[in-house]
Image (spheres, helix red, strand yellow):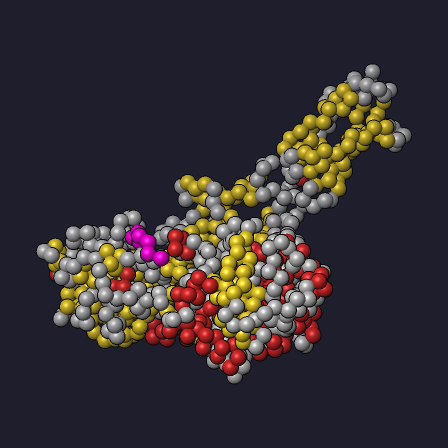
Amino acid sequence: MRVVGYLLIVLLLSMHSGANAQVSDLRGMEFRTAPQVSNELDITTALLGSPSYPLYVNDLPKTKRKNKAFRDYTLARIDTFFVRNILNQSTWFTMEATLVDTIQNYAIWIESNILEELQYDDIYTHFRTGLRTYLIEKSDEYSVNPSLGLIELLNTYVGDFPNSDNDDMVDILFLDIIDQFETTGQFVAGFFDPVNLSLYEFSNKRDMVYMDIYPTLIQNDSLHLRRSLSTLVHELQHLIHAGYEGDKIEDVFINEGFSEAVEILCGFPPRDPSWYLANSFKSLLSWEYSNPIPDYSRASLWTHYLIEQYGTSLLKHMIQNKKTGIEGYHDSIIHFGGLGFEDSFKHWGIANTVNNRERSEKYGYLHPLLTNFTMPHSGETDHIPTVISGTVPPLSHALISIPYVRNIQLQKSNVHDEHINLTGILSYPRDETNVVHPFFEDNKTAFTNIDDFGSVRILLSNNSPDVDTTWNRINILVEGEQSAIEKTIGYGDGVNDTFYSNATFLKLSNKDQKLGIILPKQNSDYWLKSLNISAVFESELMGNNQLSSTERDFKISIYTVNNARIHSPILDGIIVQSQREPGRLVKETFTLEPYFELLSNIKDTIAIVIENDLDDDNFISIGLDYSQTPYGIVYNNEWLSLGDITIGGHSLNGFTPNINITIIEKGHQTSTQNLIQSVDYNFEKVLVDVAVPIGFELPEMSLISKLPDGSFHKYEPVDSSNYLFTYEIPVQVDGTYTIKSVFSSSNPSVTITDEIEWNIDLPNGITINQNYPNPFNPTTSIPFTLLEQADVGWNIYDILGRNIRTIEPRNTQSGEHIFELDLSKYASGVYFVRAIIERERTGINYTKPIKVLMIK
């Protein structure tokens, strides 16, 4: 089902205080922010995923045999239709609709009550004319064949309709779907109800779909035909696909992906990929009915990628293929000469990360609306060395960024699941061409000689086709050299303060007004990466003449500063646009990465200047904070300090723009010192004490350990005192620990490491002490100690080696324990007691015997 959003007027709350945001310009005017929000509703997917759907589809053969009636399709004919109540999907109501047109084998019906309102309006004339044009004559410019109408495109690239009623017609009913739109702002653009293919009581026994009139087709007295047609082809695919369903019903995700792909082939815009890319850590075929928009986005992007890779004929093959799920994907891909499902899924992840077909046709998209996105990282490492560890759902992708490294080495542990494929992607801000590293062929790989500010991204792809498996484990040690460190320089505390009346934003209300901030010279050369700004635009304010849809953009310039005065431009007047949701007042980050070459070798004091983009009057206002810093400057015929400006008689002395500046500072050093002071253990944990070097600013401490089971882990301190940090590591015996302490500081920029090997000095992690008393009559106690949880049982043998008694194993926690032995039923003599230990972690069995003497 195609879902369309709608904007409602609501009360907008400001970013921090909850009060309405107030703005003041240099004349002291005040405004109140105006709000907007969007909502969406889903129906068809719920019907496809219901237990009734297979029953309706299975009714198709019976419907075709029994229903031989031919219907009257005379124009202006009125028929009565059942319409499912989408607010209570187990009920139906009836509606009269009038046949207004037949276009080839399509019958167009309009709800009779609405037709009476529309038929004398120009909108109705344009609707009928446009509908005929699109269905028969042409499609949009991005269509796979713009010279073909939608009917022929559906026939060519999807297939034939079920024709369950034997009348060779497809019925399209336009009506006002009762979805409480007027109250909630939620609406359904259209839906396919599979009940109409069955013999059910409320079935229309027709091949048909339902299309919404208000607000999908008509909104604010305007016709939105393309929006409606996009929904129409989406729902018609569901109808066609129902006729090709086999004994096993297709997954909802795959069926929806087919409909999304049909929209694109017919020339309509693809879904916004950002909905999926922001939530890529989900199994491919999963579907969340309560929030399906990211799933629609994933289905759209994946299915379209397959079509671009293997041709438009692939879609028809998949739709009509009786094989379903992963098996259906694989069968169709192989049919068209592909590498198979798992390879295609892996390459799709790289395409979403790189999106550059210059590297390989497999690594990007052709569609002009899908060429400018890349997957954001799911996580970012801090200082290396570090550990990437966790679980990954089957058939999912995640992207880990490892920024600012010279050299990097990656090593998988022996608990890393081989279903998870790792792809290294080398990335430089100055170079949009990404280098894709060969896939891991063993457990180690490396990048070397990376330039300053270079980064490596690691694409984690769980390619397991077994979607019913549990999440697979990833465990990777990341080592190397840091080349730079990211620093945030804050001007203001992030909370806007009142500087006049109720105003917390300073408005730049004409072309002569500019607001800047001085960034003093840093400790070393740096790259100016991004700005985080608290801002609001005129279109977001009540009492303005700007449309809410007006572009929200402004200019940023970077200047050198000489003798505390603006000097020469480094970056002159680039236009940046706000991407946050209109009316949502949060601090927004504006990246300067496209200007890396200009901003990656700054040495001196600079000024960052903000001004309006004068192609419109949607002026920007900047939040101010009272922080008593002298860095803010204003141009109002001449450059002045904010302290020299007054608003309504109130001085701005002590105020600064609420801006954070992110820089990447060169010169990070790596060295080794003796940091690890001691290692000890008890029954519960290994304790590691690490000394902190003195004389560093903002230290970060962590501990990395390779455990005896071969897994890598990163730990944070559990306690600290007197420059000593304490860490806790799990107890594991029968092997060696590799323990590495990592100390990082931003001033000076340095990482210090220390590494040792250590192992627990208790063989097998178990001791069994001599019994007491000994000799005994007839009971005795046998103390034993476990360092790891295990199943412990006992066998008792007589002097001839016969097993006279067995104590079944039972789960025993780590710690000190006592086994009470009772031999009251046996004669005096020497006995041998053997402990049988099976460690839960390794499954390995150990035995420990002792000799005891009973004298009665």
Instruction: Residue 597 in the image: state x and y as whole percent.
Output: 37, 75
**On-image quarter of the C terminus:** top right
Q: Residue at x 58, y 43 (%)?
A: 730
What range of the chain is rendered magenta? 8-15
- Magenta span dominant secondary structure: loop
Q: Is residue 616 left or right of residue 527?
A: left
Nearest the eye: 801 or 755: 801
Q: Quadrant of residue 396?
A: bottom right
Q: Which residue is outermost to the left?
A: 649
Q: Which residue is drawn at 76% across and 24% down?
A: 821
Q: Which residue is drawn at 42% across and 51% down?
A: 700
Instruction: Residue 407 in the image: state x and y as whole percent.
Output: 50, 67
Q: In this view, does 198 lie to the left or right of 722?
A: right
Total of numbered circles in the picture?
Answer: 0
Nearest the eye: 764 or 417: 417
**Residue 14 colored in magenta in the image:** yes
